[in-house]
Image: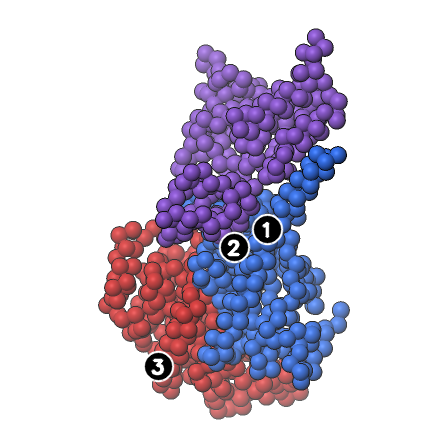
Amino acid sequence: MPEPKQPEKLIDDKGIRIDGRRLDQLRPIKLEVGILDKADGSAYIEQGKNKILVGVYGPREAHPKHIALPDRAVLRCRYRMAPFSVDERKNPAPSRREMELSKVIRESLESVVLTDLYPRTTIDVFIEVLQSDGGSRCAGITAASLALADAGIPMRELVAACAVGKIQGHMALDLSDAEDKYGEADLPVAWVPNANLVTLLQMDGILTTSEFERGLTMALDACKTIHGMQQEALKKKYLVIKEVAEEREETEVVA
Amino acid sequence: MSFTPQLPPVAKLEQKTVVDLVANGKRIDDRTADSYRPLHIEVGLIEKANGSAQVHLGKSKVLVGVKVETGTPFPDTPDEGVLTVNAELGPLASPLFETGPPSEQAIELARVIDRGIRESKAVDMKSLVLLKGKKVQVVFVDIYILDHDGNLIDAASIAALAALASAKLLKAELKGDEVVYKPGLHSLPLNNHPVAVTFAKVGKTIVVDPVLEEEQVMNARLTVTIEKNGNICAMQKGGLSGFTQDELKTVVNLAVQKAAENRTKILAAAKG
Amino acid sequence: MMVIVAEPKQVVAPGELLAEGDHVLGDNSFKVGTRIYSACIGIFEVDGTRVTVVPLKGGYFPRVGDLVGGRIVDVGLSGWTVDIRAPYEAMLPASETPGPRGPRRRDLSESFDVGDMVLSQVLAFDRTRDPLLTVKGPGLGKISNGRVVEISAAKIPRLIGRKGSMISMLKRETGCQITVGQNGVVMVWGKSPENERVAVEAIYMVEREAHTRGLTDRIREMIAKSNVVGEIARTQTA
């Protein structure tokens, strides 16, 4: 497929971006929990054109045994992009970028999982990017938190993530693929609300220190919003069953 | 796949010592929270490389070689040369390193150094073109860790910049299908001087340039790469915990200052 | 000072604030300073000063004394490796089978072979080694007939019910013998395949709707609609 052309402008004269958003607006996000049957926990996220599926297995016996830790679970994380997920087909072999992202994502999640409850086991997180549209590592973390919770793995709290960037000299929230490609900076951030800590932070591009501070604030506000969505998505499955079941009981009692 | 690394068996008592010292404003090697270990930079040791630099940062030792070869450009940037950064964390440097393909730590280190150079546009990529779309110069930056006593990222960043800044090459030209070299050595055209500054959060205290013992007990790590105008051109958080928003602000501002200090030393050393 | 923040009997998410103060920490809750948070997705329960989160999902974590249903995955020289749906594989040593000296080495696979389902009890388990099982005990041993249902271990307390009320009702109404493993493996033997089918459906219904009100009545209705002959019916016709 031909590569999409570079857009003439990333922001128009009215301050509107090429997908119609304002600078401080998130893309529409859809979250679903527990969609896979065999995985112990799973979640699916759509954010813009990102489509990411996460499956969690564990805690389970560590194989190979030599990676096991005596006093806690080993968290294993694989971030992988499907070959058809990007404009130009990606070679299925693991790339250096995927290895780096697997590491930083694991580190952002490992801060919340209560691993010392399960010594000598592994907890496996598989993040499959089915379609990529900028900010996939952040969307992956958002979904991975839900998948871990869905697996019943004890955690301190959910991790929410969102990227900001600089386009045409302006700080903008949740860059799409084109904005990331043709913009001046990209800053992915993951955050935990109770501990109030940033657990993933990377930047490439050029930012002044004050642009960084403004961007960080913008990203953390978005993470707060996303965290609320995560809690809702997690509870929704059980609340629906609750409502349906109790409604059935009421109709039968009335009848 | 990334997985929780095997932790080297650091004695609990040693760990406690480091954490307690830092909490009380001292460090295991008597430094203040915001000082670097003694830094020695030597350039030009590898004559067969276009540029080279060996850095001793405390007891950490890193050697970087820069080689400039000819090659083909990437299809989406036909008017630019190529920059490749690679890092080896070989078993020579530490009992913690194994032979084999690059570990995630090596890949992360290489990519962080690469980001600093690339995003700051330190190397003038357009000046590396011999024939647009067909033949360009490729700058290889190869990072060799020789001795691991903590903060390999900064040591590598310093060595990479020193090697690039002191690199000497013949002017290359395309005559028909062949690349010919005109006599006379030139420097590699550098437009920027990115310098990485790494911090470790030990307990609730943040220290700069963590030594190995501090890395083994730290909660989290942050590398901030600053370009010559005091702007940030790369950032990378590592480790299993995190930073507050206020800590990030403080750290970034301190990074600007520390990068400037180190940059002066690097450029002085590169002049030889 | 003791304040309950979250609403009891409601679904809570990991990291949700449950209470503040000197409460006793029950399962799946943890404390940071004076604040108590949930560690998982579950139902928030308050029992006097104890705050607990009953998980809606989660695997089985072995406890000494638990009755568990497991599948033989390997036959070794001195025992069997058993999959008990836990994060750890369990070991059933030959010495923990009934009989004067237990089976001789070469007879091990004649007693239990790979793929067999075995009802056993957890004899020993701690953080440094895998769970140890025994089949010395009444009712323990190979499961050769009936149906085996595997549900989430987190739902077993609901399947048993307060003072065994739910499981007693199920046995009675479906006319089946039901043995519940703490690890979510449930064994069902009925007078007919139809009885067994209804019992299995009821068990899955408990798993799905464990956190809802009026579950016992809904299940009783479902069984009644199925027209299987339960124990009460049997005694009436006798």
Check the image and name the residue furthest to the front: A254
In the rendered view, does A154 fall on the left or right side of C220?
A: left
Distance from the alpha carbon under mark 3 to that under mark 1: 49 Å
Reading the image, the residue beneath label 2 is A158
Q: Residue at x 70, y 15 (%)?
A: C233
Q: Which chain is purple?
A: C
Q: Quadrant of residue C168?
A: top right
Mark 2 neighbour class, 10 Å CA radius: few under 14, some 14 to 19, many 20 or more = many
Q: Which quadrant does the C terminus of chain B fall into?
A: bottom left
Q: Is residue B247 above or below residue C145?
A: below
Q: Which quadrant does the N terminus of chain B fall into?
A: bottom right
In the rendered view, does A139 fall on the left or right side of A106?
A: right
Residue A72 horizontal/vertical position (percent): 43, 46
Residue C58 horizontal/vertical position (percent): 54, 41
Distance from the alpha carbon under mark 3 to that under mark 2: 40 Å
Which is nearer the eye, C105 or B69? C105
Q: Residue at x 64, y 81 (%)?
A: A15
Q: Which chain is red?
A: B
Which is nearer the eye, B243 or B224? B243
Which is nearer the eye, B37 or B232? B232
Q: How many marks?
A: 3
| Residue C170 can be seen in this image | yes
Residues flagged by tags 3 and 2 on a common chain: no
Q: Label 1 amino acid? A: Leu
Rendered colour, chain A = blue
Q: Is residue C178 above or below residue A210?
A: above
